[in-house]
Amino acid sequence: MNNVNNNETLLRVEHLCQYFKMGDSELKAVDDVSFEIKRGEVFGLVGESGCGKTTTGRTIIKVYDATSGSVYFKGQRICAGTRSYKDAIKAARKELSSTTDSARRAELEKVISENSEEIKKAKFDHNHSDEEYAKHLADETAHEYDEKIATAGSDAAKVAELEREKREQIRVAKKSKLITQIQMIFQDPIASLNPRMTVREIIAEGLIINGIRDKEYIDQKVYEILELVGLVREHAGRYPHEFSGGQRQRIGIARAVIMNPDLLIADEPISALDVSIQAQVINLLNELRDRLGLTILFIAHDLSVVKYFSDRIGVMYFGKMVELASSDELFAHPLHPYTRSLLSAIPLPDPHAEKRRTRITYNSIAAHDYSVLKPSMREILPGHFVYCNDPEEERYKKELGL
Amino acid sequence: MDKILEVKNLKISFRTQNGTLKAVRNISFDLERGKTLAIVGESGSGKSVTSKAILGILAGNSITEGGEILFDGMDLLKIPEDEMCRIRGDRISMIFQDPLSALNPVVRIGRQITEAMLLKNRGTRRAGRRDFNDTLALLKKNMIDAKAAPESKITEMCKTFDNFCIEAIKLENNYDLALGAAEGMAKDITDFVFMAENNQKQDVKEELAEILKELKELKDPLLTHKYDARLAKYPPIISRYRAGYREGKKGTVAPIARDFLDTLNELGGVLKEIIDETRVNFFRIGYFKMKNPNEDLTKYDIAELNEKALEFLNRDFMNEFIGYAAKGIEYSAANALAAKKDVLPKLRTAREFYLGAFTRSEAEAKAKEIAVEVEKSIDRLEVNKDSVAYTFKTGLLSEINKYFNAQKKNPKEEARFAKQSAKREKLVAKGKTVDWQVIPKNVYDLDELKQDIVSVFDRMIENYETRIAEAANVDYHARAVAMIDFFRDKASQVVYKVTKRMAKEKAIGLMEEVGIPEPRTRFRQYPFEFSGGMRQRIVIAIALAADPEILICDEPTTALDVTIQAQILELINNLKEERKLSVIFITHDLGVVANMADDIAVMYAGKIIEYGTADDIFYEPRHPYTWALLSSMPDLDTKEKLDAIPGTPPNMIYPPKGDAFADRNKYALKIDFEMEPPQFPVSETHWAATWLLHPDAPKIDPPKAIVDRIERMKKAGGETA
């Protein structure tokens, strides 16, 4: 779609893991996933249900606490897990108990202390990133107003006015959070809207939580956003049940967009909608993206829509990212067998082609032999990553004629 | 073509607080045997309502305003509930949209699949016994009245017939059980040996226990008497091996001794011989056995026994019995024919009566009177029941009821409408803003309803006229033979008892068929232990448990993701081929139906707006709504902005005048807002309801995105074809 010219990385996910306890064992919902999203692009995340794409989205926005790995937003770590450090310490302690070599012992001691340091840092970043951000923002605001007051100089009335404004703005700044710049649109527009709140309350809730008290300003903002998403002012007083599915999803989008986010996580925003309404919502998201310069993490399982909407696509399979490439590249040269199987399952509105279509089945045990050489994410072409091991990498390269 | 289901002029609405919602407005379609009809439309277009009407599971506030759903000579909208019960699930089955809410969360999967089989079996057994007894009693009475033979002789023969029929089928059932065990065991053994030879992991102890259990069941004097000695040596060997077998360590497969596998193969050979034995004809042998209870049947060769028994049966009993039965049937048919001739003029006068004016009590009295006459004229001994005559009374009474209810309701509705409109006008005149709408009038057309009453008579008269004309050339002997077959069927229904174990085996077979791995373990699990795709497979297995003729799929894949969706669609397609199912496939996603459907009906606001074969709809769409549906979904080559359909579907409490899609249609003509378009034929198989096809309409090309895509598809088709 749009060419993303700047190279600013908005979101960086590094070795993110999210495990859930399941009785005695653990479910690895997201297992060592890394990717980057550049400002202004749409990053699509596809895979079948249960592969961890929604969990990835939710971990980024800190609905879950990450087990391990880090998420950097605008260069600041907002989300960090400690499991990998703990594992390193555990391994070091174990070795420590059996080795007698003093040089090695010192080395291990160092590993332990370094990792404990990392754990402290990760915990701090995970829990206090918003406070740090708010502090920083408040300082900046204070500085800005100080300058303004200095230029206003002798005008006492204006200075008083500015002072009042400064107090107000600092209060808002102290309440603001970095995480609010990431917003989420949920899959089910019926379940995600509180049936007892009017549309105005639903949309304004975020602003109010963030300490904005000016009723007029809030109303103004709500009307603006309603019109932006294709609803009208009159809708503000109604309740969610009075709307159709497509309109409800628009309310969900409005609620996310009013916070003026930089990153929007759209978790299957169209799966629950009729085909004709799906097109309306996609067009709306596209329009918002052009107007507001949004960056979108688009989670979906409908590949034709993802292809249409995204700049780059990551394919997930059972918690792992198995392939990552620009959308054209991915569809032109799918390398990982799972991607091929996914692509072969897309239904097309073409009876003749459909009758010829053969579905490729993917069986991860039969398709790969990882008993000797372990796989990792490798760059086959610039920007095209595949999860594979050495022989596979060579094979893929050969397939591409490299 | 062979039509299995016909829907004609179906109209359904729902009573709501704000007025009557017209959900389905006059739709007609046919479903051909072995074909798939897809119904496509947005939510609220009435597609699910149509399917629910077919199954008779509409919500309580629904009103069936008119139309017919014809299936196997019955009108599904008019038959009583207990008859519907026999069709629903048994002959027409449904796969629901949301597998999680269609399954009971606290009942094991296995029980949910077998439940229907067991219940159904109990019902059929009871009904079979009733039918058998009633028909036999009726036949007896007619034979006596026809004076075919002395009364005492007839009574005795009927008793004999009853006894040996049931006894014979009982014998047959035992035989079938043993045969089934042999077949199942043969399959188990092949599987077991295959797995063992390929070092695949399997639960050896359980598999062997299964085989042992089946060996125990393999006992039927007529089937296995020759083999008993040979079979006797296997159970000890197997149970000894089973007891001595030790599982391999975690993750490894302990090999199975070669000589044990050879023994199993040997057993398999014996089983094959048993399965290939000539089948005993129990209907013949039952009589033989009854007459010679002490004869040891096992000393005969089976083929020889079959012949001998037949000869004995015919000579001693059957020829005579059939002769008498034919006389009885002829007597009954002659009586019925006379009654039919008698009732025909009465039907005609009654028809005249219903054309004129009448009060409710008059009409009902008259209906009951004529219904009694009609019931007398039905030949009860006909095996193929005359469904028109049988449903005459209920059909007529329901039409009369509808007519008078409408007559009573119409003035009330008029009064309410007048009152509300006056109130609103008054408020408007005062200059107040009125934020409520007057609920539109919902009055019935009394003439039309009257015509419905008359048409019941028309159908009846036509039916009897043809029957009277055909009466001269009926072969009563053939009908008597058919009657005997009927008794035999009923007897087998009475005796055929589905045990829990049989149901389980059948259910596991079904689960395997729909592609659930390890069905034996899965059988004991709860719905929450299954993933979405697996759950949907379970729902499909349940729908197939009763071996239906029609399968209705109501958005079976909407809740699933692409790979699973593709699997489920493939599964439904395969099952359709294997079982010769006719499928009604309901969805909002045109992409899904491209490889499923033979015919497609596009629905909008309760009407079918375009109908054609899959090729017609995808390569030559004519209705702007179909264009919009096609262009609003991106395919892999779409780059430009999507053509979304603006707005939402109309509120069907206030059905718009003219074309319902006109408001959202950028190609709408002026006439679209004034008059509803009729169906314009495009080709023999294809029609569309849009004014654009009228010869005077301006020529409008479909949107560019669609033209391009069709062009591309045709090109791609040409390249690979």
Image (cartoon, coloured by chain):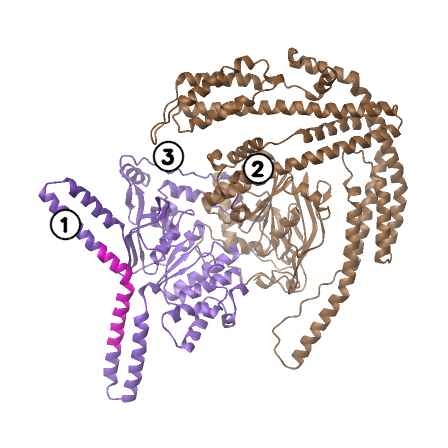
Q: Quadrant of the C terminus of chain A?
A: top left
The answer to whether mark 3 and mark 1 are in CB contact below 8 A is no
**Observer-nearest of B602 and A25:** A25
Give the residue pinned by disc 3: A366
Q: How far, Cα to Cα, is label 2 from label 3?
A: 35 Å
- Span of residues in magenta: A119-144
Q: Position of residue B583 (x, y in %)?
A: 60, 42
Answer left or right for B11 relative to B650: right
On the image, the x and y values in percent for residue B157 come to 81, 23
Q: Residues within 10 Å of mark 2 (few under 14, many from 20)?
A: many
Residue sitting at x 24%, y 79% = A146
Label 1 sits on residue: A110
Q: Position of residue B590 (x, y in %)?
A: 54, 49
**Does residue A126 show up magenta in the picture?**
yes
> Tell me, what hue is chain A?
purple
Residue for badge 2: B114
- Asked if residue A365 is positioned above or below residue A170 in the image, the reply reads above
Q: Colour of chain B?
A: brown
- Label 1 resides on the chain identified as A
Question: Is label 2 in a helix, a strand or a loop?
Answer: helix
Which quarter of the figure has residue B678? bottom right
Q: Is residue A311 in view from this perspective?
A: no
Closest to the camera, between mark 3 and mark 1, is 1
Q: Which one is earlier in the sequence, the residue at label 3 or at label 1? A: 1
